[in-house]
Image: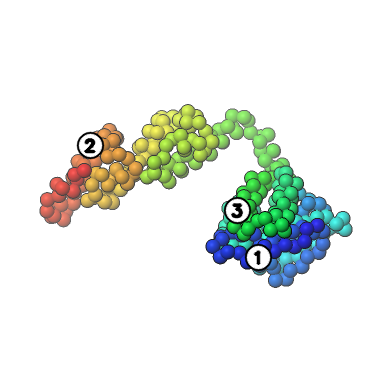
């Protein structure tokens, strides 16, 4: 067993840091005041239960991870006297909670890990590195962040979730499963375009982000809209430019083009193809309408590039 090991006073600039690490023989633990930082428990052998005040009781088995938030009263009770092994890591820092939650390690509950022994070995390696004085606080912060990411990728569904998923997959035909996957990819692709239409976003990068080839993604756009993904993105930018001009009637063509991330001459050409007139003429038309309403003076200079 590896004794409880503190890491020392953390640098205040670290948003995530290692507070403590160790392993112990499975035994009753009672902390009525909780722990000062987040705790990651890894049960290597045996089984027991965590009782968390105002939250509930969770059974934990060998090969599982359990995360506790700071300052929460809790108790751990082994189910037998088999003297199992329990490893722990304390993690602090302003970003600790957000990182753990984003990685799927919170909210509270047991998490089964694939290749559990690999993570157990990494915990012991961290302990030995600290004990030998080989790891500085800044380096340990990087190590802990990488550990959390790797744990996130290794989370397995619990038994009931596995059964539900397998039953559902059996009830779906192959074509239905492929259709469901394609719908998810297409929805995410459109969402990315909606979010980043102002950026220098290429269709191949959208395709990579949703796990498809450009050709496959284009097929999805053809099926749903009769156009390619590039054409969809172009129309989206032009529509956003038109909406922006509605809200900024005295803006220039250059400003409208830059707002949607397009080169000015190309923007003018594509805008006319899409809407039947150049953006300059449309701006002039809108300003003239405003003049008639407000009785303002000459405006020719406002719609110049």
How many C-alpha atoms fall within 10 Å of the one at disc 1: few (<14), some, or many (≥20)?
A: few
The residue at the far bottom in this view is 33
In the rendered image of this protein, does residue 264 appear above or below residue 151?
above
Q: Which residue has dot 3 on it?
A: 142
Measured in 3D between alpha carbons, the distance from the residue under mark 1 to the one under mark 3, in whole angstroms, is 16 Å
Q: Decide if residue 229 is on the left or right side of residue 111.
A: left
How many C-alpha atoms fall within 10 Å of the one at disc 2: few (<14), some, or many (≥20)?
A: some
Q: Decide if residue 216 is on the left or right side of residue 43.
A: left
Measured in 3D between alpha carbons, the distance from the residue under mark 2 to the one under mark 1, in whole angstroms, is 68 Å
Q: Decide if residue 145 is on the left or right side of residue 156.
A: left
Q: Where's residue 197, x and y in %?
A: 39, 43
Residue drawn where x is 56% and y is 60% of the image: 15
Residue drawn where x is 15% and y is 49% of the image: 299
In the rendered image of this protein, does residue 219 appear above or below residue 133?
above
Q: Earlier in the sequence, mark 2 or mark 1?
A: 1
The kind of secondary structure element at disc 1 is loop
Q: Which residue has dot 2 on it?
A: 277
Q: Is residue 153 visible?
A: yes
Q: Where's residue 114, x and y in %?
A: 71, 44
Q: Is residue 40 visible?
A: no
Q: Where's residue 207, x and y in %?
A: 48, 35
Q: Quadrant of residue 180?
A: top right
The kind of secondary structure element at disc 2 is loop
Q: Quadrant of the C terminus?
A: top left
Front residue of 237 and 167? 237
Q: Which label was assigned to residue 8?
A: 1
Q: Quadrant of residue 202?
A: top left
Q: Earlier in the sequence, mark 1 or mark 3?
A: 1
The residue at the far right in this view is 81
Q: Which label was assigned to residue 283?
A: none
Front residue of 220 and 120? 120
Residue drawn where x is 41% and y is 40% of the image: 201
């Amino acid at each position: 067993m590896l004794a409880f090991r503190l890491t020392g006073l953390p640098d205040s600039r670290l948003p995530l840091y290692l507070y403590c690490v160790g392993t112990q023989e499975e035994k009753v633990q009672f902390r009525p005041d909780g722990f000062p930082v987040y705790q990651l428990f890894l049960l290597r052998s045996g089984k027991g239960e965590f009782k968390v005040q105002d939250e509930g009781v969770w059974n934990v088995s060998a090969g599982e991870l359990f995360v506790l938030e700071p300052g929460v009263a809790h108790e751990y009770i082994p189910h037998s006297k088999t003297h199992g092994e329990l490893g722990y890591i304390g993690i602090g820092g302003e970003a600790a909670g957000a990182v753990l939650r984003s990685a799927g390690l919170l909210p509270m509950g047991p998490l089964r890990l694939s290749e559990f022994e690999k993570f157990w070995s990494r915990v012991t390696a961290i302990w030995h590195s600290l004990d030998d004085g080989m790891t500085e606080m800044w380096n340990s912060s990087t190590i802990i962040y990488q550990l959390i990411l790797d744990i996130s990728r290794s989370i397995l569904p619990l038994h009931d979730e596995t059964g539900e998923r397998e039953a559902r997959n059996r009830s779906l035909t192959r074509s239905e499963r492929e259709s469901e996957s394609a719908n998810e990819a297409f929805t995410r692709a459109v969402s990315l375009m909606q979010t980043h239409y102002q950026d220098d976003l290429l269709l191949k990068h959208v395709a990579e982000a949703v796990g498809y080839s450009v050709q496959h993604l284009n097929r999805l756009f053809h099926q749903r809209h009769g156009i390619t993904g590039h054409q969809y993105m172009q129309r989206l930018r032009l529509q956003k430019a038109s909406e922006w001009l509605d809200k900024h009637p005295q803006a220039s063509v250059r400003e409208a083009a830059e707002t949607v991330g397009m080169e000015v001459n190309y923007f003018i050409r594509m805008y006319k193809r899409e809407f039947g007139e150049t953006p300059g003429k449309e701006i002039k038309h809108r300003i003239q309408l405003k003049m008639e309403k407000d009785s303002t003076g000459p405006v020719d200079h406002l719609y110049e590039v």
